[in-house]
Amino acid sequence: MTPLDERFAERDLQSLNPYLLGPFAPIADEIAVADLRVDGEIPKDIDGAYFRNGPNPRVPPKGLHHWFDGDAMLHALYLEGGKASYRNRYVRSRDFCDDERGALKRGGIFSRARDDGGATVYKDTANTDIVCHAGKLTALWYISGRPVRVDPLTLETIGEESFGGRLPGNISAHSKVDPKTGEFVFFDYALYEPWYAYGVASAQNELLHFTQIDLPGPRLPHDMAMTENHVVLMDLPVVFTEAGIREKLWRIHTDPKLPTRFGVLPRRGDGRAVRWFEFDPCYIYHVVNAWEDGDEIVLFCCKYVDNGRPLDPEYGPYAPMVNVLALRAVLTEWRMNLKTGAKKERQVDDAISEFPVINLAYTGRKNRYSYHVAIPDLPTQLFDGLYKYDLSTGTRTKHSFAPNYFGTEPAFAPRVGAKSEDDGYLITIVANADTGASEALIIDAQDFAAPPLARIHIPQRVPLGFHGTWANRSEMSARRA
Ligand SMILES: [Fe+2]
């Protein structure tokens, strides 16, 4: 407990936290329901599943609770032959705990970190990202943690992934899968040295490459990018404070003296070969995509801009958390020439958007379309629609959710037999802010502003959460076999 806690009674701490209330409030049940009720029609040429990860505290939190501390719960929507089924399960990560005392011991972002054999460890929930690789799901943690394998069909936790015991550290959220080779490229960062590492695992789940990247100090990267032959790693000016590291407390700040640097490294390169490109300071949560264009690396991201909001005393001790989570970012392009060293940054649009996704078959290859959540100017992280961007022109089309419904990161599901990049569907889950009624939406990617083709009623509330992904049925079964 920090001294700030003492001004607030326990019941106030929980009622002041908007990320434990309304559309964010956790649910208790793990259910599986087939043949869901549908308004409209589920296209018969969708065959696979949408998965969404997010925080869902197993036991009621005590003391200060950060939204990032909740245990990971996966929600899955399976689509086949025009029918839908739903299942949700907790990810039984190493810090998942269903008794109150145990949960308290595991702490969280507002607590002092644990010392685990010299490593500074925060509660590791794997609640942030979800990736399909080698026929299984992998749940990944924001502060770089133990990757947890999950069966995509049952959502049962299989266990921690260590690539046959060869993984030397952890894996951060936003590691990527190469759609052509099936390779899994990943990064790891920590508050202790080595501060940053990069690695590759094969489609058969063997560790192929692992190398350390030299940074001037501990950093807080959140994403990376890959192209066919390179990766782009990030050194951003959001850093851990020395006092925070000394006291093992989660303390970060923006150091305005530091630049933003993108490190370009051949996919199997030694970390010493990384080539840094410096830009004006900015923070980036999420990459859209990257690719090679001749000698240039092209990188599209959502670039964080200050939300301009003052701390709101209404949220008591949660005011800083609420402020940071009021995401504001704009689509931005960076170009880096590997031959000449020339570099260029260009803001593509001024609309506020985040959580970008693409057709995953184009990861690391030149693509034209990205899909983002549209973020209204509200104090908490609520999304009222989706944008489809044409990256070649910078233009966007909006799909608005029904009034008072808020959504979560979508995924692009290619149509079976798709002929082009946007030949498919966007799938997302929305919830009514007052009633909690939750629906999965299927949106025609080529008729984006039109009403959803199908609204699939989910028989329980799905709390708003973090990242989602799509897996074709062949990716869930062929590689399993
Ligand atoms: Fe993220």
Image (tube, rainbow, N blue to C red):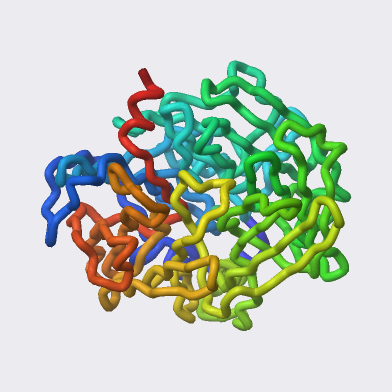
For the C terminus, the quadrant is: top left
**Front position in the image: 238 or 82:** 82
Image coords of residue 349 (percent x, y): 57, 77
Image coords of residue 442 (percent x, y): 26, 58
Q: Is residue 85 above or below residue 385?
A: above
* Residue drawn at 19 percent across, 56 percent down: 456
| Quarter of image, res 210 | top right
* Residue drawn at 38 percent across, 32 percent down: 475
On the question of residue 37 being in view, the answer is yes
Q: Indicate left or right for 196 with 17 as reference.
A: right
| Quarter of image, res 150 | top left
Q: Indicate left or right for 355 with 428 as reference.
A: right
Ligand 1 position by quadrant: bottom right
Q: Is residue 283 above or below residue 134?
A: below
Image coords of residue 464 (percent x, y): 38, 59
Q: Is residue 292 above or below residue 154?
A: below
* Residue drawn at 78 percent across, 62 percent down: 260
Q: Indicate left or right for 218 with 435 as reference.
A: right
Q: Indicate left or right for 79 with 474 as reference.
A: left
Q: Is residue 421 above or below residue 322?
A: above
| Quarter of image, res 401 | bottom left
* Residue drawn at 69 percent across, 44 percent down: 231
